[in-house]
Image (cartoon, helix red, strand yellow):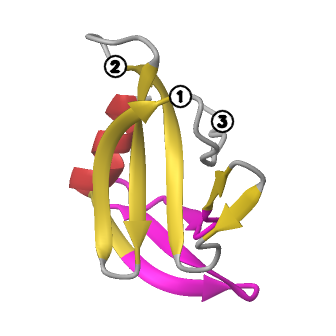
């Protein structure tokens, strides 16, 4: 959700790293110490995979309230992370999280 991505963005420690040969961010919660790895999986532009290994874009399940064909997502590279909203037709990653 957007709330979960906000928590990661504002209350997490982001460390650019490589796990099992895959670049990405290890995000560690400042409140409970739990962590999640977000691979730099790139994104799809038509049939092409773009920026794999250097960029990650992850959808949230939350729609943008003013324009429901948009959703919120995280966009990151080794220099940092930003949050955006964009058209849901784009091929960005989804990182399932179990409660």
Q: Is residue 97 visible?
A: yes
Q: How many marks?
A: 3
Label 3 – label 2 distance at C-alpha: 23 Å
Residue name at image x 43 percent, y 27 percent: 71
Residue at which label 3 appears: 98
Magenta residues span: 15-42
Please say if 48 is above or below 73.
below
Q: Earlier in the sequence, mark 3 or mark 1?
A: 1
Residue 64, percent from left and from top: 34, 19
Residue 67, percent from left and from top: 33, 12
Q: Is the Cβ of the residue at disc 3 closer than 8 Å to that at disc 1? A: no
Going by the picture, which residue comes out furthest to the front? 46
Q: Secondary structure at mark 2?
A: loop
Residue at which label 1 appears: 88
Residue at which label 2 appears: 64
Please say if 32 is above or below 69.
below
């Amino acid at each position: 959700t957007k709330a979960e991505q906000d928590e990661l963005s504002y209350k997490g420690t982001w460390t650019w790293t490589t796990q099992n040969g895959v670049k990405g961010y290890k995000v560690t919660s400042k409140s409970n110490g739990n962590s999640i790895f977000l691979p730099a999986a790139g994104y799809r532009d038509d049939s092409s995979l773009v920026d794999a290994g250097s960029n990650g874009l992850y959808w949230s399940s939350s729609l943008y309230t003013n324009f429901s064909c948009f959703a919120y997502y995280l966009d990151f590279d080794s220099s940092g992370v930003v949050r955006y909203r964009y058209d849901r037709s784009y091929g960005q990653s989804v990182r399932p999280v179990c409660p």
